[in-house]
């Protein structure tokens, strides 16, 4: 818990489930270049975590990986990302989630932005055909990709920007 910075070697690896859970003094994480997955809850509860450098070959961020990291306000997502678990970034200070350059393996994408009051911009991944979004905070902008055919969830006081002239079916 006294560690304030962790930097791993460049070996191909998977960040284990709850590996760094509740490390209160952890401020910066630089993941190995060849890390391909971050397992469930790996950095959950790291109250001082401000900076995360995701590797360029990362494919999976499992659910609740960075939940309850209230100082985390910015994350750059690599193009190789193809899976994003639910509630990955709840209780953080993120203002923007941009996964528009990512190609998700699953054509369905879920996001529950409750407990993310600072989130103002969401750019959905290309290639998804269905999304379910629970967005209750006002003034959030959601950018919808061309491939999206169906849109479900609860969205209040948000701006939707479509990349096509034909909006998707809305549940």
Image: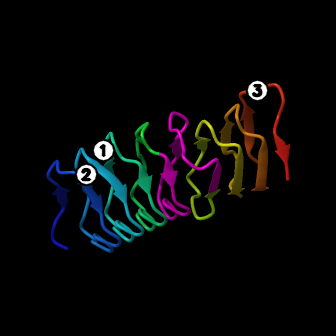
State which quadrant residue 117 falls in: bottom right
Q: Can the viewer see residue 138 in this picture?
A: no
Q: Is residue 161 above or below residue 130?
A: above
Residue 31 in picture, x, y percent from top left: 25, 51
Residue drawn 45% across the image and 61% down it: 62
Question: Mark 1 to mark 3: distance in Å?
Answer: 32 Å
State which quadrant residue 17 falls in: bottom left
Give the residue at mark 3.
164
Q: Chief secondary structure of the magenta span?
A: loop
Which residues lie in the magenta part? 82-110
Residue 97 in picture, x, y percent from top left: 52, 45
Dot 1: element = loop
Give the residue at mark 2.
31
Residue drawn 47% across the image and 60% down it: 92
Residue 71 in picture, x, y percent from top left: 39, 58
Q: Is residue 85 magenta?
A: yes
Q: Is residue 55 above or below residue 19?
A: above
Point out the tag, 1 or 3, that comes first from the N-terminus.
1
Question: Mark 1 to mark 2: distance in Å?
Answer: 6 Å
Give the residue at mark 1.
55
Residue drawn 22% across the image and 49% down it: 32
Q: Is residue 154 left or right of residue 94?
A: right
Residue drawn 76% across the image and 26% down it: 164
Q: 10 Å neighbourhood of mark 1: few (<14), some, or many (≥20)?
A: many
Please state which of residues 30 and 117 is positioned toward the viewer in this rendering. Answer: 30
Q: 10 Å neighbourhood of mark 2: few (<14), some, or many (≥20)?
A: many
Dot 3: element = loop
Dot 2: element = loop
Please state which of residues 45 and 77 is positioned toward the viewer in this rendering. Answer: 77
Q: Are marks 1 and 2 in contact (CB under 8 Å)?
A: yes
Point out the tag, 2 or 3, that comes first from the N-terminus.
2
């Amino acid at each position: 818990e006294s560690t304030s910075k962790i930097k791993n070697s460049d070996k191909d690896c998977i960040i284990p489930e709850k590996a760094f859970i509740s490390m209160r003094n952890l401020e910066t994480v630089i993941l190995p270049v060849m890390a391909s997955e971050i397992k469930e809850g790996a950095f959950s509860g790291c109250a001082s975590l401000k900076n995360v450098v995701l590797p360029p070959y990362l494919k999976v961020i499992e659910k609740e990986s960075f939940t309850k990291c209230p100082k985390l306000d910015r994350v750059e997502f690599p193009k190789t990302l193809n899976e994003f678990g639910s509630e990955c970034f709840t209780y953080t200070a993120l203002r923007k989630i941009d996964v528009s350059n990512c190609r998700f393996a699953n054509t369905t994408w879920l996001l529950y932005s409750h407990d993310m009051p600072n989130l103002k911009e969401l750019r959905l991944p290309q290639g998804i055909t269905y999304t379910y979004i629970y967005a209750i905070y006002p003034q959030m902008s959601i950018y919808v990709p061309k491939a999206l055919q169906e849109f479900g969830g609860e969205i209040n006081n948000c701006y939707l920007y479509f990349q096509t002239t034909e909006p998707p079916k809305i549940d």
